[in-house]
Amino acid sequence: MESQKREMVRTSDELGKSTGDVYKNVGSLLVKVDDKDKLKAEIDDSIETMEIRIKGLDRQEKSLRERYDALQNAINAAMGQQPISAPNE
């Protein structure tokens, strides 16, 4: 998602620099865009949405890592409390 966001930011930057015709990718077609400002606004909205999703995923990842660490500590504590028995040969 980070790479998609970077690509969208580059697209927005290039759109701001462009002076000629601009085309929008719609499925497998390229469609000429008449209103570049509207297209730039759409791209900027997509960038904002992507940033919100990335932040949400970061929070989820952090929460899962904390839960994993807590479970790992609980398992290690439980294993430490059990006596270690040597196999009888």
Image: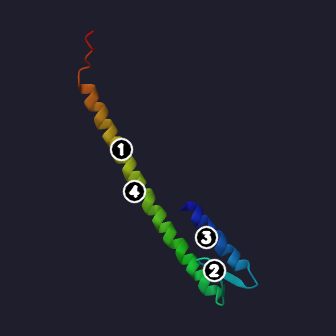
State the residue position of label 3. 8
Q: Amino acid at mark 2?
A: Leu
Residue 72 location (% of width, % of height)? 34, 38
Quarter the C terminus occupies: top left
Residue 64 location (% of width, % of height)? 37, 50
State the residue position of label 2. 29
Q: Who comes first in sequence, dot 3 or dot 1?
A: 3
Q: Who comes first in sequence, dot 1 or dot 2?
A: 2
Q: Who comes first in sequence, dot 3 or dot 4?
A: 3
- Classify mark 2: helix, strand or loop: strand
Residue 21 location (% of width, % of height)? 73, 85
Q: How dense is the environment of label 3, judged by Cα within 10 Å: few (below 14), some, or many (20 and up)?
A: some
Q: How dense is the environment of label 4, judged by Cα within 10 Å: few (below 14), some, or many (20 and up)?
A: few
The residue that appears at 28% across and 26% down in the rendered structure is 80
- Classify mark 3: helix, strand or loop: helix
From the image, state whether disc 2 or disc 4 is nearer to you: 2
From the image, state whether disc 1 or disc 2 is nearer to you: 2
State the residue position of label 1. 68
Q: Who comes first in sequence, dot 2 or dot 4?
A: 2
Q: Amino acid at mark 1?
A: Tyr
Residue 12 location (% of width, % of height)? 64, 75
Q: Who comes first in sequence, dot 3 or dot 2?
A: 3
Q: How dense is the environment of label 1, judged by Cα within 10 Å: few (below 14), some, or many (20 and up)?
A: few
Relative to 77, 52 lies left or right: right
Q: Amino acid at mark 4?
A: Gln
State the residue position of label 4. 60
